[in-house]
Image (tube, grey):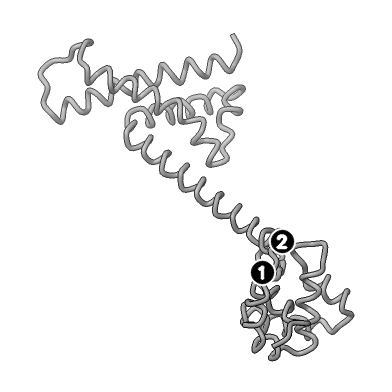
Amino acid sequence: MSYFFKIIIIILLVGIFGGIINYLLNGMKTEKKYVSIFDVELLKCIFVGMGASLLVPLFLNMISSDIIKQAETNDYMLLVFIGFCLIASISSKSFINSISEKILKELGDKVNKIEEDVKPIIQSSLEPDNDTRKNMKGTYDSLDNLEISILKSLENSKYVYRTINGIVKELQENNERIKSNIEKLINKGLIKYKSIKNKNMYYITVKGKECIAHEGIED
């Protein structure tokens, strides 16, 4: 028998055992005088216990634990894994609810992250309309030449996200001046940044695109 099937059998057996313990603990609370193998509540506890036990590998994966892999060659880790399954099946309802909430939260966080990653790409493909460009006259007129150059560098680049070093190299300007002007543009809402691999990467916003698109538009 393969290790995989052994683990499945262990999970199910421990789930059944934990479900029975859960049933007995609940019976002590309700002061039941007898236990029947045909009791609907017992069957519920057993099936829910098995379900909770089957979720243990998922839980271990979520916390980046390799207990299951270690258990293949280490009897002590196998006992630890059995303990996890037993705890999960005894507290099956709470465990399942906890895992479900954690998974939904992680999925929500991942969706939000994807939306944030895609947003600049979508923004970079939008064409500002002339009416909006005219409304940006005051903002455009307040920019100095270096700020305009930075915006154009971001707008015309083949990359959606730019580093300060890349902008400095392209514009052949002083690093501190570029940083200072980027801060001004961020405060004006014309560019934004996000951290990618522990580096701040900058991109132009829709407002920034509308601002530099003001060039050539008559008042």
Percent x, y of residue 91: 32, 33
List the residue tagged with mark 1: 193
Which residue is at the front of the view, 212 or 31?
212
Left or right: where does residue 28 sit relative to residue 212?
Answer: left
Q: Residue at x 17, y 25 (%)?
A: 27
Element on which disc 1 rests? strand
Q: Residue at x 17, y 15 (%)?
A: 35
Left or right: where does residue 199 sit relative to residue 31?
Answer: right
Give the vertical position of 139 relative to 166 (above or below): below
Element on which disc 2 rests? loop
Left or right: where does residue 144 sit relative to residue 131?
Answer: right
Q: Residue at x 58, y 25 (%)?
A: 74
Amino acid identity at mark 1 = Tyr
Can you tell which mark lies on residue 125?
Answer: 2
Task: Measure the C-alpha gap from mark 2 to mark 1.
Answer: 18 Å
**In this rendering, which labeled residue sits more in front, label 2 or label 1?**
2
Percent x, y of residue 30: 12, 28
Corner quadrant of residue 155: bottom right
Which residue is at the front of the view, 70 or 171?
171
Q: Residue furthest top?
A: 1
Amino acid identity at mark 2 = Ser
**Badge 2, how many Cα within 10 Å: few under 14, some, many 20+?**
few
